[in-house]
Amino acid sequence: MMRNVYDFNTLQYDSQLCSGCRMCTIVCPHQVFEQNGKIAELIHPKDCMECGACQLNCPTDAITVDSGVGCAKAMMIAAVKGKKEPTCGCARP
Ligand code: SF4
Ligand code: SF4
């Protein structure tokens, strides 16, 4: 069941679909997700800036978010690297 846990943004996460691949914890620039045992947990949902990287990288469609302009840095990195879709990692070194 899709959970809508707050009203601050459009991010929704269905933990029942999570396979625990950790991609959302890796690509999210604001550490919105954290691995909790075998699945991801939404720990800072209010920090989501709707870049869309988690949804793009989630293999099980456990995450949905209406991404607007997205993360500008991720888009620039993707363009430079010739990737079709940006994978945001702007908070990572
Ligand atoms: S990317 Fe999707 S399947 Fe992978 S840990 Fe995050 S929510 Fe789960
Ligand atoms: S949309 Fe972007 S900021 Fe929001 S949770 Fe997903 S990766 Fe993080």
Image (cartoon, helix red, strand yellow):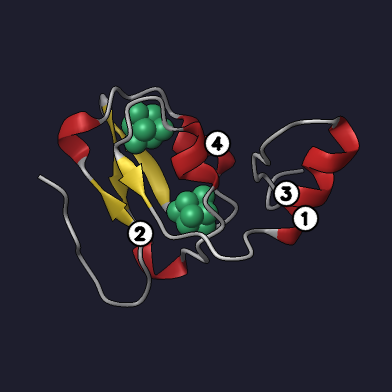
Disc sitting over residue 73 in the figure: 1
Disc 2 residue lies near ligand 2 with CB under 8 A = yes
Q: Nearer the viewer, residue 38 or 72?
A: 72
Disc sitting over residue 11 in the figure: 2
- 3D distance between C-alphas at marks 4 and 3: 13 Å
Q: State which mark lies toward you, 2 or 4.
A: 2
Among the two numbered marks 1 and 4 on one chain, the one whose residue lies closer to the N terminus? 4
Q: Are marks 2 and 4 in contact (CB under 8 Å)?
A: no
Q: State which mark lies toward you, 1 or 4.
A: 1
Q: Quadrant of the C terminus?
A: top right
**Label 3 sits on residue:** 74
The residue furthest left is: 1
Image quadrant, ligand 1: top left
In this view, 35 is above or below 31: above
In this view, 74 is above or below 18: below
Does residue 46 appear to the left or right of 38 in the view shown?
right
Q: Nearer the viewer, residue 21 or 92?
A: 21
Q: Quadrant of the N terminus?
A: top left
Does residue 15 appear to the left or right of 82 in the view shown?
left
Residue 33 percent across, percent down from the top left = 40, 47
Element type at mark 1: helix
Query: Which residue is drawn at the image coordinates 60% and 52% (left, top)?
Result: 29
Which amino acid lies under the numbered mark 1 shown in the image of this protein? Answer: Lys
Among the two numbered marks 2 and 3 on one chain, the one whose residue lies closer to the N terminus? 2
Does residue 74 appear to the left or right of 40 in the view shown?
right
Disc sitting over residue 26 in the figure: 4
Q: Is residue 72 visible?
A: yes
Among the two numbered marks 2 and 4 on one chain, the one whose residue lies closer to the N terminus? 2
Residue 28 percent across, percent down from the top left = 54, 47
Which amino acid lies under the numbered mark 3 shown in the image of this protein? Answer: Ala
Disc 1 residue lies near ligand 2 with CB under 8 A = no
